[in-house]
Image (cartoon, grey):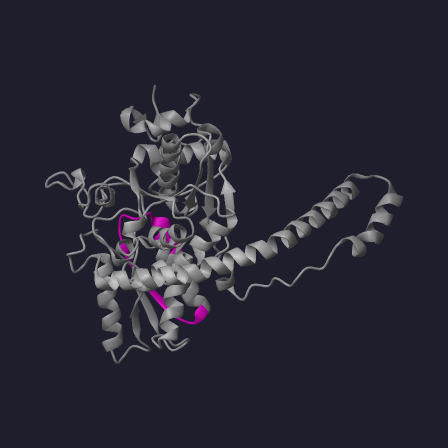
Amino acid sequence: MSDNSRYFTLGAFLLGVAVATVYQTKNSSAGAEHRRAERSKQQVRKRLLQFSKTNDLEKVKKTISELPEIIEVGQSDVKNGIEGCIGNTPLIRIKSLSDATGCEILAKAEFLNGAGNSPKDRVALSIIEMAEEQGFLTPHSGDTIYEGTAGSTGISLAAICRARGYKAHICMPDDMAIEKSDILLKLGAEVERVRPAPIVDQNQFVNLAKRRALEHTNDPKKQGRGLFADQFETEANWRAHFTSTGPEIFSQTGGKLDAFVSGAGTGGTISGVSMFLKKVLPDVKIVLADPPGSGLYNRVKFGVMFDSKEREGTRRRHQVDTIVEGIGINRVTHNFDIGREFVDDAIRVTDDQAMAMARWLVENDGIFIGSSSAVNCVAAAKLAKQLGHGHRIVTLLCDNGARHLSKFWAQTEAVGGSDEEMSLNDILNADQKETVRGRVLG
């Protein structure tokens, strides 16, 4: 780790002590009040439910007259713009996976973030707020944010830019699901879809976004300045998860969890969360979920960036040979490197396993997710099998499946399209069995 990284890690730990203390103090004092409020709400719900079922007009009148007395007026809870709807997402128990593994598998519903509907909302807002604090952005001046992204960060940036008075210009690989660029266009962003290429190529989507930002700033005919968001390297990325996602998980689990599982694209999520959780829960296990073609699995397991699919003559795509979008990469970003020492293990997840898991979650839980979320859930289930019964594992549901219809879900058999029942073991062993469009045969 570089001296710079060590400096930021030390600073993060010191900040972690302060944040953890605040959360513990806040939780202990607020816990009793929260339970009292919940009991009161349940009593009111019970009375109203009885009211809704009765046909006795006199009882209805009596209940209506008592409403002002039985319903307490709580504190005002009005969010300030779309930015106020970012963070504090629910932590939900995935019933089917928990029941099948004997572990409690919990998922942070990050698709319920209110701007771009993914964990990238946290990062995008952090990037913009940091740039505003440093004087690099001025609302309604023509300032434009440029970013190279697989889609989700771009969507979050485009939405928040509109809310804060900026423009967005997004560069993305042209083999990403078309829904993502369609959403970006509807949000008013300028979109450049370019051929997938390795990072050493100057026309690679991240490099192109950086160049476009510089061109904007140097062009006297253009209003405002161009700002390169730089999600892969910026400190605003991991810090967003260190100060929000990690503390939220700690608070929502009551500080009781055995493992956290997450994929990594920029690396900001797994680094930020792990840096916080390892400080307050030193024994928590941090596990990377990695798709085919990504070198991060071998980086964590063996200390080298290499994947067999990257051998000369075997690679079909310029970046990562998988249908999974948003996670998996073949270089170590600053955001991954800052938290690398806190990642304990890695689990490889194949495309077939991810597609089978996506179908499983719809069929058994009504949860409709995208490809990276499916990878997270496969890895969480695999880890549950390794750890054995009684453990508590937290992962992320990153975005909704609606963004993946033309690619990931297009290659997955429709739910209900087969009469054969599929077990969780079938999914976890899908890499060893014959599969058709996410359905395990035999």
Residue extending farthest right = 58
Residue 191 appears in the rendering: no
Q: Residue at x 33, y 68 (%)?
A: 145
Residue 272, position in %: x, y? 36, 55
Q: Nearer the viewer, residue 312 or 171?
A: 312
Can you say which quadrant of the picture contains the C terminus? top left
Q: Is residue 224 left or right of residue 317?
A: right
Based on the picture, tell me whether residue 328 belongs to the magenta stretch. Answer: no
Residue extending farthest bottom = 220
Residue 28, position in %: x, y? 57, 54
Q: Residue at x 51, y 49 (%)?
A: 252
Q: Nearer the viewer, residue 50 or 306?
A: 306
Residue 155 appears in the rendering: yes
Q: Nearer the viewer, residue 92 or 389?
A: 389
Residue 99, position in %: x, y? 49, 30
Q: Is residue 242 left or right of residue 104?
A: left
Residue extending farthest top = 442
Residue 229, position in %: x, y? 31, 65
Question: Is 50 drawn above or below residue 220 in the view shown?
Answer: above
Q: Number of marks in the image?
A: 0
Q: Quadrant of residue 5?
A: bottom left
Based on the picture, tell me whether residue 166 belongs to the magenta stretch. Answer: yes
Can you say which quadrant of the picture contains the N terminus? bottom left
Report the span colored magenta.
164-185
Question: Is 425 drawn above or below residue 109 in the view shown?
Answer: above
Question: Is 136 drawn above or below residue 303 in the view shown?
Answer: below
Q: Residue at x 83, y 48 (%)?
A: 63
Question: Is 33 drawn above or below residue 141 in the view shown?
Answer: above
